[in-house]
Image (tube, helix red, strand yellow):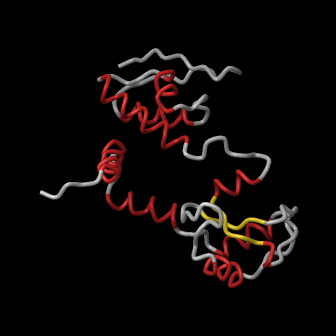
Amino acid sequence: MHQQSPQYEALLELLNVLGASEDEAIKAVLSAFTPCQPGALRQCWARQPGFGTPPKTREIWDIFESAKFRCRECKSYLRITLDHINGNPKDNRLENLQVLCADCNRAKNNRGVVNKDARVKIYRAAITLYKKLGRWPTDLEIKDACGIRDLSGGIYMVRFIQSLLGYQKKLNRYDSKHEYGDSLRK
C-alpha cells in the first residue's frame, strides 16, 4: 500500500470535514491559484474614481506572464494580482505594476498583515488539539497551541469547523479585548 504524505493526509482530512466533493475541491483550488481575469481587473480599475486609466487587457496579461504567474515577493501562485509599485493607484504605467499575492500586497501597505498564515495555523492547532483531547478545544487552547496572540477573524473559521464536527457554540459578542466565551453545547 502506498504511504501518503502528511500534507496530503491533512488535506484529505480537511476535505472530509468540509464534506467537499472532488469537483468542489478542484473549483476551490483553481479559484485560489488561477490569476484574476485581466478584463475583469481592468473593468474594476476603470470604475474606481481614485484609479487612473487602466492598462489594456493584453498588457495586464503580459505582466502576469512575464512574472510566470508568481508573486514577486514570496513566489506563490496563490491569489495573485497587480500592485502599484510606488503606491499611487493613478499611476498605471506598465513599469509601475508588479505581480503580488494578496498577502504580500496587503503587507506592503498600511493595512499590513500580522500573520499571513494565521488561518492555517489556527486550523491545524484546533484539529490537532481536537484529536489529542477528544473534545473541541477552547479558544485559549487554540491560541496557545498555534502561538497566535489573537484569533481575530479566524474565530469565524473555528466556529464553522466546530459546527461541521457537531459542536455548536454561539459566537459571543465581540469585545475590545477580543475575548470569546468557551462554553460548548453538544
The x, y position of residue 100, in whole percent, is 66, 64
Above or below, comparing residue 179 to residue 123 in the picture: above
Would you identify the image quadrant in which residue 65 lies? Answer: bottom right
**Viewer-closest of 16 and 100:** 100
**Viewer-closest of 139 and 26:** 139
Q: Residue at x 38, y 24 (%)?
A: 136
Above or below, comparing residue 152 to residue 105 in the picture: above
**Viewer-closest of 160 and 65:** 65
Q: Is residue 170 left or right of residue 113?
A: left
Q: Residue at x 58, y 73 (%)?
A: 69
The x, y position of residue 180, in whole percent, is 57, 20
Q: Residue at x 66, y 75 (%)?
A: 38
Above or below, comparing residue 62 to residue 7 in the picture: below
Q: Residue at x 55, y 41 (%)?
A: 118
From this viewpoint, which residue is outermost toward the left?
1
The x, y position of residue 138, in whole percent, is 45, 21
Indicate the quadrant containing the C terminus: top left, top right, bottom left or bottom right.
top left
Q: Is residue 4 left or right of residue 34?
A: left
